[in-house]
């Protein structure tokens, strides 16, 4: 099947691509189990010893190539992050979809505490920039790309795109408190896992770019104040670990709104194949319209 023939990227299509990539990379496709499905389909292989990420579309290739370069940079710097495995050149490309193979980290479900997260993020922001160039952070480009693929009602799509344009204009007027530099792009508790030795490591490296460090701080803050997913004590530990409270900066509300929009756009990609996701997207859109509480947003 060619790239043009595959019109649906669902769990079955992703696993088919993974199995073909395993053959090319000389990896045994034993015990394949899907972990999550978003911009990538993420699988555990060989009892969790290997984690594979299958890009949703050929458009993901540049960011995955950057992810591979970032992984090498962080390894050379001795920074605790996910490491690539297999001797094959990565990413492996099947039907245009980029596929990567990574060391499995523990059970894949044991997360760092928030103080460790803050300390790791501070260390990341203190690293010297890599010798290769990182693209400027352009979060609203992702919204547009995701909405193009989303099978959602036209009024919802139009509302989300208009909101993105409004927030992009506000974002461009912000005056940031911290110096710009390399950022993870998607730093949150779900992306800081413990390895088999119990040591926290940062994963999901494909969103790296150059931009305001406040962007990396916002998710943990909003998980506390908007969603209640962190306690006050946990958020305080994060602030102490990093050394700066982004909630006290004047532009925080704009970044929080941008992050919420990205969460909705991310989920909208699955609306065409997952009725529960489609229902959740519409609920979230209504919440954004009305300014209602985000505390009943279901996790995906």
Image: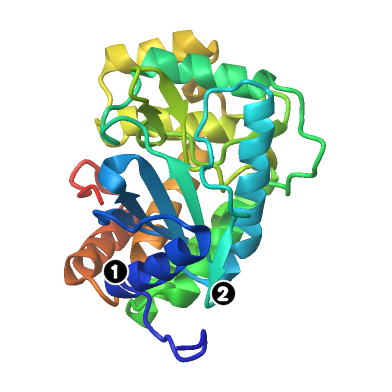
Q: CA distance from mark 2 to mark 1?
A: 17 Å
- Residue 168, visible in the rendered structure: no
Residue in the picture at 26% in, 66% down:
282
- Residue 46, visible in the rendered structure: yes
| Rendered image: mark on residue 106 | none
Is there CB contact under 8 Å for labels 2 and 1?
Answer: no
**Above or below, comparing residue 137 to residue 34 in the picture:** above
Q: In the figure, residue 110 lies in which quadrant?
A: top left
Look at the image and tell me in which quarter the N terminus lies: bottom left
Residue in the picture at 62% in, 29% down:
75
**Above or below, comparing residue 276 to residue 191 in the picture:** below
Q: Residues within 10 Å of mark 1 (few under 14, many from 20)?
A: some
Q: Which residue is mark 1?
A: 11
Q: Which residue is mark 2?
A: 96
Residue 217, given in percent of the width and then of the height, sits at 51, 28
Residue in the picture at 51% in, 84% down:
3
Q: Residues within 10 Å of mark 2 (few under 14, many from 20)?
A: some
Residue 241, given in percent of the width and then of the height, sits at 47, 10
């Amino acid at each position: 099947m060619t790239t043009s023939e595959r019109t649906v990227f669902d769990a079955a299509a992703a696993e088919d691509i993974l199995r073909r990539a395993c053959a090319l990379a000389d990896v045994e496709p034993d015990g394949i189990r899907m972990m999550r499905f978003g911009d990538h389909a993420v699988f555990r292989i060989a009892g969790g010893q290997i984690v594979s990420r299958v890009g949703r579309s050929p458009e993901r290739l540049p960011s995955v190539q950057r992810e591979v370069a970032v992984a090498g940079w962080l390894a050379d710097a001795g920074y605790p992050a996910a490491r690539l495995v297999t001797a094959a050149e990565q990413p492996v490309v099947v039907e245009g979809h980029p596929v990567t193979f990574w060391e499995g980290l523990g059970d894949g479900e044991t997360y760092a505490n928030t103080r460790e997260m803050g300390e790791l993020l501070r260390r990341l922001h203190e690293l010297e920039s890599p010798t290769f160039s990182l693209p400027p952070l352009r979060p609203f480009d992702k919204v547009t790309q995701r909405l193009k693929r989303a099978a959602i009602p036209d009024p919802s799509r139009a509302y989300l795109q208009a909101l993105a344009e409004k927030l992009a204009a506000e974002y461009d007027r912000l005056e940031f408190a911290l110096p710009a530099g390399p950022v993870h792009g998607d730093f949150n508790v779900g992306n800081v896992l413990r390895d088999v030795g119990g040591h926290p490591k940062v994963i999901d490296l494909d969103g790296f770019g150059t931009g305001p460090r406040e962007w990396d701080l916002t998710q943990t803050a909003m998980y506390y104040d908007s969603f209640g997913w962190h306690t006050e004590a946990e958020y305080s530990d994060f602030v102490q670990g990093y050394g700066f409270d982004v909630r006290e900066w004047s532009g925080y509300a704009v970044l929080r709104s941008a992050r919420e929009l990205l969460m909705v756009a991310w989920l909208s990609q699955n609306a065409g194949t997952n009725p529960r996701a489609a229902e959740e997207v519409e609920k979230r859109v209504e919440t954004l319209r009305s300014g209602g509480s985000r505390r009943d947003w279901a996790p995906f």
